[in-house]
């Protein structure tokens, strides 16, 4: 699994001109599922998302507090395009992304583990496989890439 975390002041998801979810200060997480990813990978990534220290503490210590520490919110958005290959030509190749029902199941495991690891009411979601409008106000900007599973073996062994 792969995720892009963005520290935000606010973020929201709209589908068909209907507001779906919105958060204030916290983390916007774009997540993608690859072939070979497992529920353990989803759990591992969810844990990393919640534990990542992206904010300074009250004494000015840099990178000391997680989204939980600041009582922030989390907005998770499925985004298979994170796994696109652009090595050949000018058209992205999406064979690196798991498709359909399998991807939905693992994404839902990831989302539920983020909720279980924090406060469910502070964790929001987009709509799987929908054409979404995602709006955000990036804070910093701070944007990080994380992975777990086959595409993130090196990162996993370093954690």
Image (tube, helix red, strand yellow):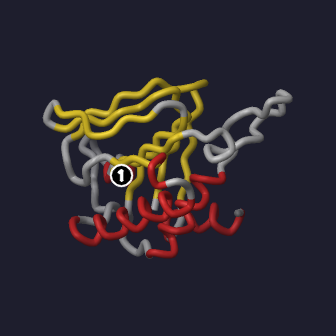
* Element marked by disc 1: loop
Q: Nearer the viewer, residue 92 or 81?
A: 81
Q: Seen in the image, is 28 located left or right of residue 144?
A: left
- Judging depth in this view, the residue of 31 and 126 nearest the camera is 126
Residue at the spot x=75%, y=38% of the render?
63
**Where 156 sits versus 119, above or below?**
below
Residue 14 locus on image (x, y percent): 24, 34
- Residue visible at 54% across and 47% down in the picture: 145
Residue 23 percent location from the top left of the image: 43, 35
Q: Residue furthest left?
A: 16
Of the 4 image quadrants, the one containing the C terminus is bottom right
Q: In the image, is 38 to the left or to the right of 129?
A: right
Q: Using the image, determine if residue 137 lies above or below residue 125.
A: above
The quarter of the displayed image where residue 36 is located? bottom left
Query: Mark 1 highlights which residue?
Result: 85
Q: Residue at x 13, y 35 (%)?
A: 16
Looking at the image, which residue is at 25% across and 54% down?
128
Query: Residue 45, position in %: x, y?
Result: 54, 61
Q: Is residue 100 above or below residue 60?
A: below
- 48 horizontally vs 105: left or right: right
- From what the image shows, is residue 85 above or below residue 35? above
Quarter of the image where one finds residue 107: bottom left
Q: Is residue 44 left or right of residue 84?
A: right
Q: x, y (%) of residue 18? A: 18, 34
Q: Residues within 10 Å of mark 1 (few under 14, many from 20)?
A: some
């Amino acid at each position: 699994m792969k995720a892009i975390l963005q520290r935000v002041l606010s973020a929201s998801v709209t589908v068909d001109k209907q507001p779906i979810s919105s958060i204030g200060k916290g983390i916007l997480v774009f997540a993608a599922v690859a072939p070979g990813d497992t529920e353990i990978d989803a759990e591992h990534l969810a844990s990393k998302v919640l534990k990542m220290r992206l904010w300074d503490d009250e004494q000015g210590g840099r990178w000391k507090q997680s989204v939980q520490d600041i009582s922030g919110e989390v907005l998770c958005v499925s985004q298979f395009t994170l796994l696109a290959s652009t090595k050949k030509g000018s058209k992205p190749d999406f064979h690196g992304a798991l498709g359909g029902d399998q991807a939905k199941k693992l994404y839902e495991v990831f989302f539920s583990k983020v909720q279980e690891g924090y406060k469910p009411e502070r964790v929001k979601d987009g709509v799987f496989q929908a054409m979404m409008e995602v709006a955000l106000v990036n804070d910093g900007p701070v944007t990080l890439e994380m992975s777990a599973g086959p595409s993130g073996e090196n990162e996993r062994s370093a954690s």
